[in-house]
Amino acid sequence: MATASSDESNGTASPARGAALALSGLGALGGFVLPPIMGIATSLIGGAEAYARGFLPLAALALFALPVVFALDRWNKEHHVSV
C-alpha cells in the first residue's frame, strides 16, 4: 500500500510534481497533435516527396523552440536562478 507524501496529505502539490505533470501533458499533446498535422502536410504535398516533406511541421516546431530555449537560458542567467 502506497503512503501519501507530506505534500499530498495537506492538499498542496510540490513544484516537482507540477513540472512532471506539465511535461507529461506536453508529451501527450505532442503525440496526439503532431502525427495528424504531419499527415495533413503529407496529403497536401502529395507525390514522391510527400513523406519527407511531412516532417516540415516538426522542423518548424524545432525552429520555433530554439529561440525560446535561448531566451529562457538568458533570463535564467540574468536572474541567477539555479536549477
Image (cartoon, rainbow, N blue to C red):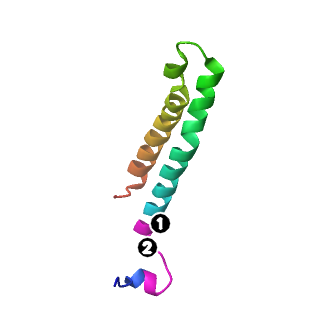
| Side of 1 relative to 52 (left or right) | left
Q: Nearer the viewer, residue 68 or 40?
A: 40
- In this picture, which residue range is highlighted in magenta? 8-18
Q: Which residue is mark 2?
A: 14
**Is residue 6 magenta-colored?**
no
Circle 1 Cα neighbour tier, 10 Å, few/some/many (<14 / 14–19 / ≥20):
few
Q: Which mark is residue 57?
A: none
State the separation of the CA atoms marked 1 and 2.
6 Å
SS of the residue under disc 1: helix
| Side of 23 relative to 1 (left or right) | right
Q: Is residue 20 above or below residue 4?
A: above
Q: Is residue 64 above or below residue 17?
A: above
Q: Is residue 44 above or below residue 39?
A: above
Question: Residue pushed farthest top?
Answer: 48
Which residue does the image show at 42% across and 44% down from the upper left? 74
Q: Quadrant of residue 20?
A: bottom left
Q: Is residue 1 above or below residue 79?
A: below
Q: Quadrant of residue 39?
A: top right
At label 2, the amino acid type is: Ser
At label 1, the amino acid type is: Gly
Q: Which residue is mark 1?
A: 18
**Is residue 17 magenta-colored?**
yes
SS of the residue under disc 2: loop
Which residue does the image show at 37% across and 82% down from the upper left? 5
